Image (cartoon, helix red, strand yellow):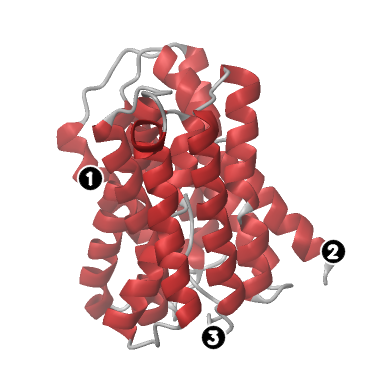
Amino acid sequence: MDIRGLCYVLSAAFMWGIIGIFTKYILKDGVPALEIAFWRAAIAWVLFTSHAGITKQLRVKTKDLPILLGFGFICVTLFYASYQLAIRDVGVALAAVLLYTAPAWVAFLSRMVLGEALSPAKIACVFMTIGGVTCISLGPSIFGNGPLMQLDKFGLAAGLVSGLTYALYYIFGKKYLYRYPTPTIFVYALPFGALFLLPFVNFAPKTPQTWSLLISMAAITSYGAFSAYYAGLRRLEATYAAVIATFEPVVASVMAFTLFGEDFGIWGYGGSVLIIAAVLIVVIGGNSTPKKQTSTD
């Protein structure tokens, strides 16, 4: 295995894993979750546009603009918004785990949209994911003597939506966007995504510290993470890269426990193990996954 590739992908996973840390501190400064999503998209767009301009990767075919518009709405507007709302309402660790229901969504969507076989391993993964989410959300009341945590239903739903929209990165990338480099895709998708968020954003006053956090978040968890991940993909097989990237929820959970004392009980951790195991089954079994694909947090 290429050590440099391993380090690149681990770096990307770490950067994605600290999204929740930035979000927590920015929320404390009075910035709403949807405004955080808006600025993450808008600032990252400036960085990707600069990158694409320098490398002369700005051009796309006119016929592909509607696809990029759809990609921006689903995979930027809905994904960024739902993940920030999930972090706000259920915490960093649980939001990260719910995000990683994405492989189960990919298994179903690949069958319906791309005609890929739904293998026994994929079916097992889907049931493991459902079991994991059940343990996290309903385990204490079903198997215990009362709730061990106060679960916000809207936050749970937002987390599941983030997993679905994250999965759609793979579908869009494989079916439509494989012919464009990553900076080109985000030059067009990010402003569309930010524009769709704009009507729902209530802008709050921000201190210089808040602006520095927003800029750092976009630079690190969007531009930096995407760039590192794809640098790793140039040196590793996609399957290895995907397995290494599952380090993200581990980072998120450890950071959430260390900094914020988030602990969602034995059933929550049991469900987390099931979901992470399902992720590993899907990505290890996904030998047909193309090396160039669109994937991100």
Quick one: 270 or 176, which is closer to the camera? 270
| Cα distance between the residues tagged 2 and 1 | 39 Å
Task: Tell me the residue that label 3 is attached to.
Answer: 288
Q: Position of residue 168 (x, y in %)?
A: 35, 65
Residue 216 versus residue 71 in the image, above or below:
above
Q: Nearer the viewer, mark 2 or mark 1?
A: 2
- At horizontal 60% and vertical 47% (from top left) the residue drawn is 248
Quick one: 138 or 58, which is closer to the camera? 138
Residue 3's mark? 2
Residue 15 versus residue 105 in the image, above or below:
above
Quick one: 284 or 32, which is closer to the camera? 284
Q: Position of residue 120 (x, y in %)?
A: 46, 81
Residue 276 in sight in this render:
yes
Assign the N terminus to one quadrant of the image.
Answer: bottom right
Amino acid under label 2?
Ile
Task: Tell me the residue that label 1 is attached to.
Answer: 195
| Cα distance between the residues tagged 3 and 1 | 35 Å
Q: How dense is the environment of label 2, judged by Cα within 10 Å: few (below 14), some, or many (20 and up)?
A: few
